Amino acid sequence: MSKWLKGTVLENRHWTEDLTSLKIDVDLGQFNAGQFVRVGLEIDGEVVARPYSLVNSPAEPALEILFNIVPEGPLSPRLFQLKPGNDIFVATNPAGFLTVSEVPDVAQLWMMATGTAIGPFLSILKGDEVWQRFERVILAYSVRMADEQAYAEQISALVEAHSEQLCFIPIITREEVDNTLRIRIPQAITGGELESRAGVSLSAENSHVMMCGSTDMIRDVSEVLESRGMRKHRRREPGHYTSEKYH
């Protein structure tokens, strides 16, 4: 148990019947906005854990994670049922490279998220570094149904606070909602809808793309970006897009 911290659930917010966020009181220590950490419960005498991106910024006192229930999974249905005051375990080693510090210097930072993968981008956007480094930040957030688009109030507050820099593009693929796109992110790039909404171009010369979400989205967007002469970013070979998959 030495690699685990015991935390306490502060809040369990059910956004839909299978989408929830947990706030956790635990002294994790230092982490970088955009990173993930393993969170778990003791089940049959051992800690069963999965990695979850942190929604909170490093400056916020409580950890927060956002996740969907996997009905056949051993952990998420139990996490969904937790109440304030319940114990929960958090690993001591946050990790991940979906951070602003890993992004090369460019004018425009594009953030593309599907589903619960909005979490790491909110963590980044609530900090200071992203606003100091980039002239424009474009957040494209895609979900299937409108009620799955979590943290709408936080996003609205960020847009208001950074109105000269932040452009938010909501995407809802399975129902018609005013002022949203009804198209998958890859097709919205190919068809020009994202650039039209943002009012700026997406190119290797001026942009870096951070992607977090489904395997299909990351694969398809990567192909579109590569058709524009953009390549995957690596420390040894700086590129134009970084990604983290949510399965």
Image: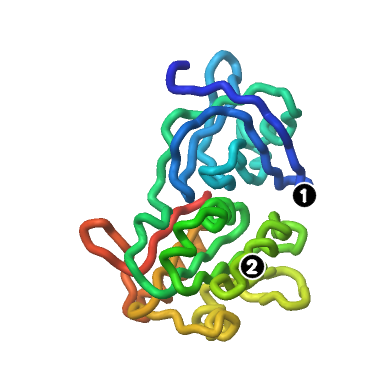
Q: Earlier in the sequence, mark 2 or mark 1?
A: 1
> What percent of the width, then of the height, locates residue 174?
72, 69
Front disc: 2 or 1 = 2
Q: Which residue is mark 1?
A: 16
149 or 43: nearer the viewer: 149
Q: Which of the 4 quarters of the picture holds residue 180?
A: bottom right
> What percent of the width, then of the height, locates residue 107?
40, 75
> What percent of the width, then of the height, locates residue 32?
44, 45
Where disc 2 sits, the SS reads: helix
Give the left or right position of residue 82, taking residue 197 as reference.
Answer: right
Classify 240 as above or below 93.
below
> What percent of the width, then of the height, locates residue 60?
58, 42
Give the left or right position of residue 183, taking residue 191 as reference.
Answer: right
Q: Which of the 4 quarters of the picture holds residue 24?
A: top right
Q: Amino acid at mark 2?
A: Val
The residue carrying pointer 1 sits among few (fewer than 14), some (14 to 19) or many (20 or more) residues within 10 Å by Cα, namely: few
The residue carrying pointer 2 sits among few (fewer than 14), some (14 to 19) or many (20 or more) residues within 10 Å by Cα, namely: some
Q: Amino acid at mark 1?
A: Thr
Classify 68 as above or below 44.
below
Q: Is residue 213 visible?
A: no
Q: Which residue is mark 2?
A: 159
Q: Is residue 161 visible?
A: yes
Residue at point 45% right, 69% down?
A: 109
- The residue furthest left is 236
Residue at point 52% right, 54% down?
A: 127
